[in-house]
Amino acid sequence: MNLHDLQALDRAHHLHPFTDFKALGEEGSRIITRAEGVYIHDSEGNGILDGMAGLWCVNLGYGREELVAAATRQLRELPYYNNFFKTTHPPAVRLAEKLCQLAPEHVNHVFFTGSGSEANDTVLRMVRRYWALKGKPEKQWIISRENAYHGSTVAGMSLGGMAPMHAQGGPLVPGISHVRQPYWFGEGRDQSPKAFGRACAAAIEARILELGEDNVAAFIAEPVQGAGGAIMPPASYWPAVKEVLAKYDMLLVVDEVICGFGRLGEWFGSQYYDLEPDLMPIAKGLSSGYLPIGGVLLGDRVAETLIEEGGEFFHGFTYSGHPACAAVALKNLEIMQAEGVVERVRDDLGPYLAERWGELTEHPLVGEARSLGLMGALELVADKASGRRFDKRLAAGNLCRDLCFASGLVMRSVGDTMIIAPPLVITREQIDELVALARRALDETATRLAEIQQQ
Ligand code: PMP
């Protein structure tokens, strides 16, 4: 079937996630047919460096035969059985053990789901159940942050702080309150990063007091906001948040769906920021995206309460701990360990990306270039000195993203913030290529914007 037939069928029958259905129908979608290493290939034979590792998930890169073999073996032996009603199977048990070895010391249990959104739905139910079991059912409020992303299910998007999603969603899950995000470049440049980070932590405390400590169940956050724009908080933020949370009787939920499995150069973002979460939703890099699987890692105080006092927990998914997904995830983690992938991000690739990516600060369009581990962002600005943004109608970020794609690099735009999160197996040479392609796209974006503004 040729490209045009596929595009026509796509237009006729397929509604894509996070997409303006009508606009895409008019444009036609790009069809990705295969991938190898850090490159995806489209139906026209173009190779494109995947600077986003799919959707922040293909940590081991494409074409890993060991993962294919693990899936095939498991599908042959036991393609499906569930973990309901007192049964289980070897891959789920072995993956649970492996995850608890890798997780922080106080984390010794996992509940499997099919995705990150389901993981956050599970979090919401576990948080409420925990406090009910503790005899404090009035502790219902969960504090989250504006511009956070925690998934697309009703609970996921309610926990998240994406204004456009809330605007389309109808009534949200009640009992979720959002505070300001630690986005210094976007919202804090009238203060030093240090003061701004502390102010954002103080906003959490103010909200706790406003809602009443007795009514507050938990605080949820991504270590680094991913979908919001690869927002690394100021260094003062997490220490100050920890201080605040230590004063109150509440749970900490750290959403590791993006930061988990090596993205920041530690197994978990919680380890990078020295956090002790009670609950950690995980997904994406857990299986390098080869098969869908997520879960919630539980710290001992929540796990023990649910186990010892909870009776039956009426919650679970048909695909909780799916055997083939679990087998692939286990193999994925084994390979990451054997190849020292996380250590390489921490000691070599992360610092190298920081150096090379940092050079883009000099570009006239770039107000800030930041990175941590193998996650990076560029802030596009109309005026470097003041940091003034482009007129929204120019959609500079989308323009830059499209030019990037056309020249062979996947870089995502969030408004006028350009973001990358390449596979963790990228080489130094490929980082050089990524930076060169990004620079070229920035040049082209500058030229096009100048042309448009002159018209
Ligand atoms: N949490 C975070 C931090 C995420 O980035 C995402 C996905 N981008 C999710 C949850 C939701 O995961 P999924 O798309 O697998 O449901």
Image: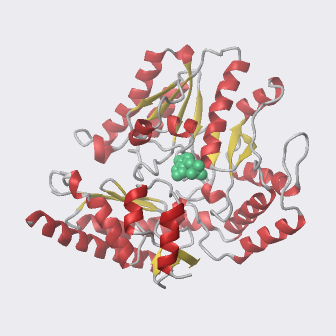
In front: 450, or 231? 450
The residue depicted at 57 percent of the width and 61 percent of the height is 57
In this rendering, position of residue 67 left or right of residue 219:
right
Q: Quadrant of the C terminus?
A: bottom left
**Do we see residue 272 in this rendering?**
no
> What residue is drawn where x is 58% and y is 65%?
58
Say whether residue 441 is visible.
yes
Q: Is 251 in front, or is 315?
A: 315
Q: Position of residue 454 (x, y in %)?
A: 8, 66
Q: Position of residue 374 (x, y in %)?
A: 48, 63
Using the image, determine if residue 437 lies above or below residue 298.
below
Is 184 in front, or is 158? 158
Which residue sits at x=62%, y=32%? 124
As drawn, 274 above or below 27: above
Q: Residue furthest left?
A: 454
Q: Residue 139: x and y, percent?
A: 60, 18
**Display colour scheme:** secondary structure
Q: Position of residue 50 (x, y in %)?
A: 48, 71
- The quadrant holding residue 434 is bottom left
Q: How many numbered marks, from 0 up?
A: 0
Whether residue 300 sits left or right of residue 391 in the image: it is right
Horizontal arrangement in the rendering, residue 208 relative to residue 294 (left or right): left
Report the residue at 43% width, 39% height from top. 168
Question: Quadrant of the image for the N terminus?
Answer: bottom right
Q: Eyeballing the image, is 355 above or below 378? A: below
